[in-house]
Image (tube, helix red, strand yellow):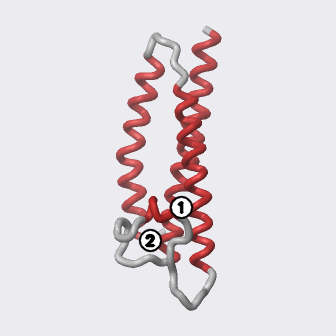
Amino acid sequence: MGAISLSREFFFLSLIVPAVAWLLLLYITSEKPTRWSKGVLVLFLFSMFINVALSQNYIASLIPNSEGIGISNPLAYWVIGEDNWAQRWSPQLFRAVYDASTLASMGLLFLYAVLLIIEESKRSV
């Protein structure tokens, strides 16, 4: 990954990690039984759906054609857009966005597992 994706990942982690830690702390200390894992599962499934669209877009960008490079599906266009990430589309840009999406999906999967463990420990008490 290049310097552009490293700075995006740092920005992403510097905002998301403290927010998730704060929400987990609120969740652990709450008295009411809540099922946050269901919401995180929905987010994870949506994230995986977008991840598949971004991977298809990245793979399509590697196939040479005479028309140039483009975004191959509406979900990838929704995430990448025309000028949100860089001046021009490139396979490296598509790979960086796909990698960031994969990290987000893995983070949601980890959060889902942690929430399930916490919910089971609260239920058994």
Name which of mark 2 and mark 1 comes first in the sequence: 2
The residue shown at (51%, 86%) is 68
The residue shown at (41%, 29%) is 23
Label 2 Cα crowd, 10 Å radius (few <14 / some 14-19 / many 20+): few
Secondary structure beneath disc 2? loop
| Left or right of residue 57, residue 3 in this image | left
| Left or right of residue 117, residue 2 in this image | left
Nearest the camera: 51 or 118?
51
Secondary structure beneath disc 1? helix
Q: Which mark is residue 99?
A: 1
Residue closest to the far top: 125
Marks 2 and 1 in Cβ contact (< 8 Å): no
Q: CA distance from mark 2 to mark 1?
A: 12 Å
Label 1 Cα crowd, 10 Å radius (few <14 / some 14-19 / many 20+): some
The residue shown at (61%, 13%) is 123
The residue that mark 2 highlights is 2
Depicted 40 relative to depicted 59: above or below = above
Where's residue 34, x and y in %?
51, 18
Where's residue 45, x and y in %?
60, 44
Depicted 64 relative to depicted 18: above or below = below
Nearest the camera: 18 or 59?
59
Amino acid residing under circle 1? Asp
Looking at the rendered image, the quarter that the C terminus falls into is top right
Depicted 31 relative to depicted 65: above or below = above
Amino acid residing under circle 2? Gly
Where's residue 49, x and y in %?
60, 52
